[in-house]
Amino acid sequence: MFTLAADISLRILAAAAAVGLVLVVLRVRSGAARHAAWSAVLLAMLTMPLLMAIVPRVEVPVPSTLALDFGAIAGEPAPYEAVVTPIDSELAEFEGSLATTSPALEAQRTLPRLPFDWRTAAITLYGAGLVFFFVRLAGGWIVARRLVAGAARTDVKNRAPVYESAAIATPLTTGVFSPSVLLPLAWRGWPVDKLAAVLAHENAHIARRDALVAFLAHANRAIFWFHPLAWWLERTLAVTAEHACDETAAREVGQPRRYAEVLLDMAEAVQRRGHRVSWQTIGVDGSGLLGTRIDRLLKGDVMARMSGVQRTAVAVGCAAVLALAVACRQQVAPLQPDPEVARQLEAQAVRTKEFYATRDMTPAQADVLEARIAKDPNDWDARKQLVTYYTAGRAVPWEKKVPGLRRHALWLIEHHPEHEIPPPSLSPQYDPEGFAQAVRLWEGHLSRPDASPFLVYRAARFFTPHDKPRAEQLILRGLAMDPESAALKAKMPPNVGGYQWDYQLGSLYGAALMGSRNPLTRTYDEEQSRSPFAMEVRKKLDESQDAALLGRVGSHLLSAASREPAVAAMNDLGRRYAERALMLKPDLESARRSLQRAEQRERHFRLQQAMREGALVSDADRVAFLAAKAQLAYSMADATWHFRRDDGKAVATAEERLAEAKSTAAEALKLAATDPANPEYSETVTSVHQTLGLVALREGKRAEAVRHLQASAEVPAIPESADIGNVTWLRLTNYLLKDGERESVIAFLEAYAKVRPAQRDRLLEDAAAIRAGRMPRSFQTMFARP
């Protein structure tokens, strides 16, 4: 609201200044023309929000630290960021990395917060002023109505009824839609020419609808009572209306000097009475700066007429400057990418391109690289390509794959075990001979007293898929050598995680219990889950008091989303580990979040089944289910548009899912409103509004999307203990930023930081980046990939 009021205030001020300049440049002296020009400014001020919505935009280059418009960055979102909605196994888990806390934000968080809310105070003050001035306007209207009611009808022939009243000293006209002329009792003693002049003036007011313009000016002042222009317009319109009517009356009477004498008579009458009722009335008295009016009469200005060319020039000039004031938007530089993020994205793009090119090599191309290696074993570019080719290549003949992997793995282990190119994994099932040779080479390196933590790390990674007991020994050895994982961190590229010893150990134990070969996967193998090592892991964990380890293993097991009984049993085991971890360390955030997500997933599975069977569920459960269902429907539709946009049948299904998301979200919002005391009210309403915002954007309704975005932050704060890390806001704000909604996105981020304290730092950092003209990291990743 504040942004809109400020925008309107500045635009109309610029428009008024431009109209004034037009009147000065064209030397407009006509009161009627000036009144028409300022009436146009008044109407523009009253209807500015509507005009801004319908008038085409005109971009104007104006320097600013805050962009009001955005030059779109070409390109589709490269990665599809799935919305967290654990309602169905089709949806993958989203793990968004939160930005680290900056010193500036940390200082801001520690500052004492004052209880004074300036927004509430400003709204209260504005509301009080609005009520006061509208009450005053209504009071003037009532007084004017009473004047007419207490007056006596005369037999004077006129275009409007003429009344006489003892309550007034000078003639006046009142009534917006049914005007009446009121005369003082002294009118019966007036000369005929004086009465004719007075009636000519009042009839001019009626013909020009000056009472309606005056009413709108009063209403505008009540709405914009804080804006000096509203007060100035009210006064100027009253003065120019009198000038215009003077022109009409003087021409009709034909004697400007005699008409000037009538004005002096009116002014003397007012002075004798000492007051005049003026609210909602207009008249011939001296309210329009008497001296100026008489000067215009004596100089002959009132008798001058504008030429047709001048009238056209004034009309076109005023219309043009008003249209420009309404249509102009700041044209500022697009948000600038963060150089470090741009460098990382560029490097990632290069790696991705190289990977696909290498993966799709032909055997002949691989043979060329092998020839290079034969000449120079340290040709690292060729060796890197060959390792990728044999590991992930699509066209590698099987008879070449196993020997190729063995050849390069053994050479790297023997000569450069710590090189940035890691040795490829060898399988004891498919290449027992090569695996045995690799074991001997690793043992030789590991037996040295100067074996580094990174060497131990590399060996552990090599053995993890196929020899978990040996990998466990190596991880424990590395943990003893490098408890804080500092040596590993020094060797890792930026923004790479999961290498820490405790993380590796937890993932290894989780994979062993699941029976999966790779700790990065969540597949389940019942036979392997009962291996001797898995049983030994269970025993260790049952006796362990290491909260971090229990929490990590619990998170690993809880992340397996399946309704198979065996996997459900793994979920139950993970839940027990996570709960024990929280008993040992109540502030262990990772364990708490894992339990929250698992509970939400289980709840939605139960609700989904119950609703399929037609069973009764509580309104609170139904709201949460509908909100998640709407999120999922939109996510699946959005994924189709990104990856299958050329598939007509899939697109048609996506449109159906979009309609489902919209109707389901609307139902959830309506149901949520019936129980605002529901502990999940804030989470649900936030999710639903953000889903509806995404749907509105897909339908091309940006203003509606902004309203939903703002509404999603108008809920009570979500306690950190109950925050499951919903990141739907990321997609909606990024899409709106791409469409130019910087101010609204900044306002949302700053308001949402109060709703989600757990994500406060990330939200405020994104808002600060936009204010500084930089892309938030997620936006840059989504829209500014090389």
Image (tube, helix red, strand yellow):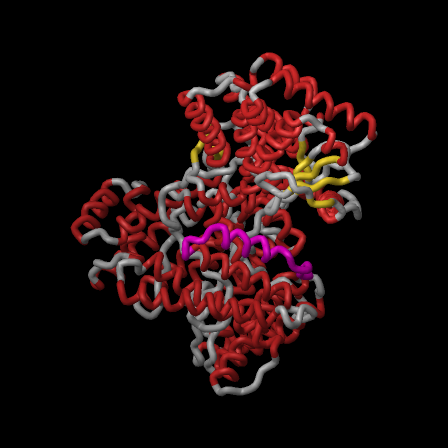
Q: Which residue is at the front of the view, 485 or 146?
A: 146
Residue 127 visible, this orientation: no
Tell whether position 654 is magenta. Answer: no
Residue reaching furthest to the left: 364
* 486 vs 426: above or below: above
Tell whether position 718 is magenta. Answer: yes
Q: Residue at x 47, y 80 (%)?
A: 563
Residue 251: image x %, image y %? 54, 23
Give the side of residue 125 with respect to residue 528, left or right.
right
Residues drawn in magenta = 698-720
Give the side of residue 411 with respect to residue 143, left or right.
left
Residue 600: image x %, image y %? 57, 72
Q: Which residue is at the front of the view, 697 or 428?
A: 697
* 314 vs 179: above or below: above
Quarter of the C terminus within the rendering: top left
* 506 vs 251: above or below: below
Q: Residue at x 22, y 51 (%)?
A: 361
Residue 570: image x %, image y %? 53, 77
Q: How many marks?
A: 0
Q: Which residue is at the front of the view, 369 or 395?
A: 395
* 749 vs 572: above or below: above
Residue 633: image x %, image y %? 44, 67
Residue reaching furthest to the top: 299
Residue 646 visible, this orientation: yes
